[in-house]
């Protein structure tokens, strides 16, 4: 079965899962030169096998709110592919979570994890639970109830979850506590734990910092650096604020962050004091708009950041937040580099538009792989029961992001995707990640 036929098959079967189809098509479109060079892939139906998750667990979560009322949510864990190692990937708690969203995230995670060069397969999970407006005790009861179900399917060598949207250190701690309570194991089965009870230093910062390390490599390839560059960041969560923090530390001027209510624009840039304020504000679920009363700048209610002039965009909120009109705005406003902090923040049309206009484009699979990479380092620290220092982890992260950058560049050149000096990071990264997984599947025969 050709790649095209495999796509037609999932469109017929899962046509309603638009996010998953979008992610599968993106890979399909870019790996063709690699697939054509390896007839064994088609002979063993590697693509057709890879687009079907190994299994999906789908469960009900009952919990009680503060009034003692019973609440019911849906939970999932998608174990997509474990050719390279235990299933690995985050848990998302957000009302927009569906099986389609988790399948797209799990599918992307396979190739992202392969790109890190570490022994981890791909998975994702979560719930349609909405943490907004919930008290701490409600979040705690939900996390306990969620893990009471999930623990049946995970273990340190089988499947190791972590955080994602709506799941940070607090939620990970509650879930880890319930896992330990039920299994009586201290194997560190979820990553992103608190430092001091199994967590790795730098895991909190890793995704945002890693994205900026990737960007540094992209700039270097064009004989540029971050000094004085104007950066637009979207989102105001874990990834966004750490990307903003690292870009600022390296000399850039980050002028926007945003959330579901609008965009905060400060043309003088978010220095460390302002970034710390933003972190504290979001931690307490308070409005970003209050920033203006303290530090000045502008609050653009219900607006995205892309109408502002800049050199670099780092969309770091959620999938499909940048559509074709936004992409046009980016190009018109001078953006030369787009680095995806989020997973699939650009629609397919937006990607086409910016690539057509030769904007350097780092797909999430490559650019935001630093988070899961440091999760894998947390797993190895848990296995040997020793901690690494902040600087040791930071050095490993820099090295991993450089390797991803360089291997994607090399593949873009090798398969003729670099034209007139334009490095096609999307094609390059997809081919490198896909090849590592596909070669393992070929070696295994038809198991896996
Ligand atoms: P957080 O929950 O910390 O922050 C999410 C941010 O995005 C918030 O500012 C939130 O706004 C905004 N947001 C979320 N959903 C929407 C939406 N539907 N519309 C508008 N704004 C939205 O999540 P993370 O920072 O962890 O994750 C952000 C992205 O990065 C996701 O795509 C995630 O998959 C990806 N990612 C995360 C990694 C990690 O290690 N955490 C690793 C790799 C990728 P508000 O506060 O108003 O809800
Ligand atoms: O999308 C992602 O890579 C994550 N949310 C992090 C996954 C992980 O296992 O650390």
Image (tube, grey):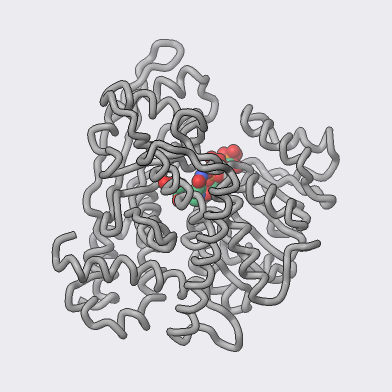
Residue at image point 38% right, 29% down: 176
Compared to 340, does 377 lie above or below?
above
Residue at image point 26% right, 34% down: 59
Residue that lies at the very extreme toward the left in this rendered image: 446
Ligand 1 placement by image quarter: top right
Asked if residue 122 shows in the view, the reply is yes
User: Of 88 and 350, which appears nearest the observer?
Assistant: 88
Asked if residue 321 shows in the view, the reply is no
Compared to 74, does 113 lie above or below?
below
Residue 159 quadrant = top left
x and y percentages locating residue 96 in the rendered image = 44, 42
Residue that lies at the very extreme toward the top in this rendered image: 68
Residue 52 quadrant = bottom left
x and y percentages locating residue 188 in the rendered image = 37, 35
Count of residue discs:
0
Compared to 153, does 141 lie above or below?
above
Residue at image point 60% right, 56% down: 315
x and y percentages locating residue 177 in the rendered image = 38, 24
Q: Is residue 309 left or right of residue 222?
A: right
Quadrant of the frame with the N terminus: bottom left
Residue at image point 71% right, 43% down: 301
Q: Is residue 229 left or right of residue 426?
A: right
Quadrant of the frame with the C terminus: bottom left
Compared to 18, does 205 lie above or below?
above
x and y percentages locating residue 142 in the rendered image = 39, 24
User: Of 21 and 193, which appears nearest the observer?
Assistant: 193
User: Of 425 and 350, which appears nearest the observer?
Assistant: 425
User: Of 114 and 93, which appears nearest the observer?
Assistant: 114
């Amino acid at each position: 079965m050709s790649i095209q036929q495999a796509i037609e098959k999932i469109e017929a079967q899962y046509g309603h899962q638009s996010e998953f189809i979008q992610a599968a098509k993106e890979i399909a479109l870019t790996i063709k030169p690699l697939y054509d060079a390896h007839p064994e892939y088609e002979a063993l139906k590697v693509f057709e096998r890879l687009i079907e998750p190994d299994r999906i667990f789908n469960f009900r979560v009952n919990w009680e709110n503060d009034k003692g009322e019973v609440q019911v949510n849906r939970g999932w864990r998608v174990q997509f592919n474990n050719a390279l190692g235990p299933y690995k990937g985050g848990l998302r708690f957000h009302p927009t979570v569906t099986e389609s969203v988790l399948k797209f995230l799990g599918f992307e995670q396979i190739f992202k994890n392969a790109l890190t060069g570490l022994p981890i397969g791909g998975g994702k999970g979560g719930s349609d639970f909405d943490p907004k407006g919930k008290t701490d005790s409600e979040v705690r009861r939900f996390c306990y109830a969620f893990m009471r179900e999930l623990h049946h399917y995970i273990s340190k060598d089988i499947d190791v979850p972590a955080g994602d949207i709506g799941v940070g250190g607090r939620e990970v701690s509650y879930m880890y506590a319930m896992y330990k309570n039920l299994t009586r194991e201290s194997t560190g089965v979820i990553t992103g734990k608190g430092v001091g009870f199994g967590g790795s230093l730098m895991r909190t910062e890793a995704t945002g910092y890693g994205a900026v390390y990737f960007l540094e490599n992209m700039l270097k390839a064009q004989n540029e650096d971050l000094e004085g560059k104007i950066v637009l960041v979207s989102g105001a969560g874990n990834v966004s604020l750490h990307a903003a923090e690292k870009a600022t530390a390296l000399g850039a001027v980050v002028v926007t962050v945003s959330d579901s209510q609008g965009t905060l624009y400060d043309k003088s840039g978010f220095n460390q004091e302002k970034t710390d304020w933003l972190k504290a504000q979001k931690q307490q679920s308070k409005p970003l708009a209050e920033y203006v009363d303290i530090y000045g700048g502008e609050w653009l209610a219900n607006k995205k950041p892309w109408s502002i002039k800049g050199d670099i965009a780092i969309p770091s909120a959620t999938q499909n937040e940048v559509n074709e009109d936004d992409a046009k705005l980016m190009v018109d406003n001078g953006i030369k580099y787009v680095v995806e902090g989020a997973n699939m923040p650009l629609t397919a049309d937006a990607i086409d538009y910016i690539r057509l206009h030769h904007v350097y484009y780092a797909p999430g699979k490559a650019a935001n792989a630093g988070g899961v990479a440091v999760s894998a380092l947390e797993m190895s620290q848990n296995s040997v029961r020793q901690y690494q220092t902040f600087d040791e982890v930071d050095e490993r992260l820099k090295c991993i992001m450089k390797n991803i950058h360089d291997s994607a560049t090399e593949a873009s050149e090798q398969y003729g995707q670099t034209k007139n000096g334009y490095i096609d990071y999307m094609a390059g990264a997809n081919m490198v990640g896909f090849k590592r997984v596909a070669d393992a599947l070929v070696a295994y025969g038809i198991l896996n």
